[in-house]
Amino acid sequence: VPIEEVIRRRISVRTFADQPLDKIILGKIDDVLSSLDNPFQIPVTIRRIESGLAENGAKLGTYGVIRGAGHFLGAAAAEGDLALEGLGYGFEKLLLYLTSLGLGTCWLGGTFKKSEFAKAMAMPEGQLFPVVSPFGLAAEKRSLADILVRRIARGDTRKSWPELFFRGDFSSPLAAEEAGDYRAVLEMVRLAPSASNKQPWRIVRDGNHFHFYQQQTPGYSKTFGYDIQRIDMGIAACHFHLTAREKGMPGKFIKIPSPLPGAPENTHYVFTWMAE
Ligand SMILES: Cc1cc2nc3c(=O)[nH]c(=O)nc-3n(C[C@H](O)[C@H](O)[C@H](O)COP(=O)(O)O)c2cc1C
């Protein structure tokens, strides 16, 4: 399935059909778990469990946000430079693969009981364990909690091009019509999921360089105890990279010391895509 179609098809699914998944599908998922890479070379631990079979008698709570999920995936990584970005990239690549198999998923960074999941998934101690995702077949009718969470996050909306993408520096917005070959690549970033749908990615195109900046939502990281929006940056890199790769547009992610002056308030540089 073309990556653009998969990205457009993905939405957060919070209500699942009470229907067991085929062993062949679960086998396919397990096969990709061990081969998930990310361009930042971050080792990411990914575990899969069936909620009914949670070992150690662990319960798996999602504060009523997720209904009927029989399966979960979780991701952990040791803290370090680009660790959460690498985790975001790798886990999103996995969730897009599940989407391509016709399964529903939902990133959960807040509404899951971390200690219960860490125990059930035997996550390595001392690592950051920021997210899980339920997966399975979407139910036909959404739960009330699902409808409310989606409405509060305004999950169906996205910021416009001029709010997200720039040309040369932050004072000149980049219009979709000016993006040339990169139009679809940037559009796929625009459609990415992000925590509370805050869409912190800002990208400045400077010739063959695309500088990725993070616009931090003030106070937001205090809620989580770490900067969850770094994960969103990794998700953006994933959508950008997979789309560019499928379109045969080579390049790589690099880090440049302070590439641009004049970044807006609360906005800092993270990495650059260098087109080749
Ligand atoms: C890092 C991250 C954490 C998230 N945490 C939660 C969460 O705790 N609970 C929840 O219901 N949705 C969570 N979401 C889902 C977002 O709310 C959702 O992606 C966004 O509203 C856009 O909607 P969409 O995914 O349907 O396109 C999270 C998304 C990301 C990327």
Image: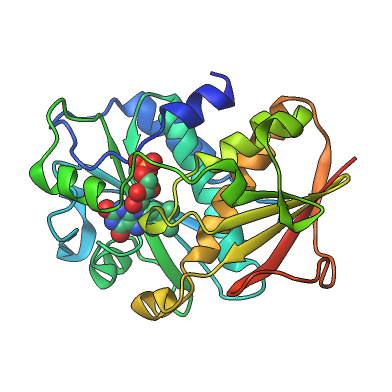
Residue 89 appears in view: no
Residue at the limit of the structure toward the front, as seen here: 171
| Relative height, residue 90 to residue 239 (above, below) | below
236 lies above or below 114:
above
Q: How is the image coloured?
A: rainbow
Question: For this view, does 268 lie left or right of residue 55?
Answer: right
Residue at 51% across / 36% down in the picture? Answer: 31
Q: Which residue is rendered at x = 19% and y = 58% of the image? A: 62
Residue 138 at what x, y percent from top left? Answer: 23, 30
Q: Which of the 4 image quarters holds residue 113? A: bottom left
Q: Position of residue 211 (x, y in %)?
A: 75, 56
* Left or right of residue 168: residue 105: left
Between residue 40 and residue 174, name the one nearer to us. 174
Query: Front-most of 216 and 71?
Result: 216
Q: Is residue 214 above or below residue 235?
A: below
33 sits to left or right of 50: right
The C terminus: image quadrant: top right
Residue 211 showing in the rendered view: yes
* Front position in the image: 254 or 80: 254
Provide residue 239's location: percent of width, then percent of height.
59, 40
Tell me which residue sits at (34%, 39%) in the image. Answer: 156
Give coordinates of residue 121: x percent, y percent: 33, 60
Residue 61's image quarter? Answer: bottom left
Residue occupying the far left of the picture: 144
**How many discs appear?**
0
| Apparent side of residue 164 relative to residue 211 in the rendered image (left or right) | left
